[in-house]
Amino acid sequence: MKLTIVSGSQRAKSQSLNVAKYLAKLANTHFTEVDVLDLYELNLPFWNEGVWQGGEEWKQWTPIAEKLKQSDAFVFISPEWHGMATPALKNFLLLTKDDELAHKPALLVGTSASVNGVYPISELKVSGNKNNHVCFIPDHLIFRNVQDIIDENFDCQNESLHERSVYTVALLAGYARALAPLHGDMLAAGKPFRFGM
Ligand SMILES: Cc1cc2nc3c(=O)[nH]c(=O)nc-3n(C[C@H](O)[C@H](O)[C@H](O)COP(=O)(O)O)c2cc1C
């Protein structure tokens, strides 16, 4: 099984990227391939109609979409910025389609330099999957005081959060196994209903 982890911070050397690297280490137990996409490094343009016509600036999206298609599960990490998910992650989700994500499980992860981090998860759970039809699993993770918790080796210094992370990544893998047939079985049938009600 393949996992793609998306670090949603558009800042260089972000804490969210550190969390992505930590979760990637945990995920290696369950997934044969784990990729981390750093939205700072990718520096994707904001959505425009060119993406539909395959414009020059969107050539970089094709291999990313292909990677997502090949993935069995996802982790979406967002720092809380002014109580919101980042523009970079919202833009990324705007670019995704049912072809890549539909009926595959995704774990939502919030990060905060203080004691917050739940708002981006709430925001994404409300509408982040309406058109791409990704399945957010019921459990999520929040890394509060994140700069004090993930060390330079990308290990988690908070034992209870580490135990919860080990469990939640295992849970994500369980959903990936259970939901595996759904994408292929339902993608074509869902095309008339892909934009919701
Ligand atoms: C524009 C901006 C807004 C922020 N707003 C919040 C916030 O609302 N709540 C919060 O807990 N942290 C906030 N932070 C701090 C982040 O939690 C902090 O940057 C943390 O390291 C996670 O972001 P990173 O992945 O970009 O490093 C904000 C940071 C920035 C740059």
Image (tube, rainbow, N blue to C red):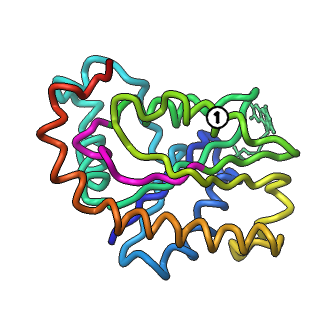
The correct choice, above or below, for 36 with respect to 90 in the image is below
In this view, the residue in front, 24 or 18, is 24
Mark 1 is on which residue type?
Answer: Ser
Identify the residue at the far left of this view.
Answer: 188
Q: Provide the residue designation for mark 1.
A: 122
Q: Position of residue 57 (x, y in %)?
A: 29, 30
34 vs 161, left or right, is left
Depth order, front residue of 72/70? 72
Residue 115 lies in the magenta stretch: no
Q: Quadrant of ligand 1?
A: top right
**Label total for image:** 1
Give the SS element for disc 1. Answer: helix
- Bounds of the magenta span? 97-108
Q: Is residue 103 magenta?
A: yes
Residue 18 at x, y percent in the picture: 66, 61
Residue located at (18% from left, 43% from top)? 187
Q: Which quadrant of the structure image shows residue 35?
A: bottom left
| Residue at left offset 32%, top offset 18% | 197
Q: Position of residue 80 (x, y in %)?
A: 72, 37
Q: Is residue 192 left or right of residue 46?
A: left
Q: Residue at 25% across / 59% down in the picture?
A: 70
| Quarter of the view holding residue 125 | top right
- 74 left or right, relative to 14: left
In the image, is residue 47 above or below residue 171?
Answer: above
Question: Position of 61 compared to 29: left or right?
Answer: left
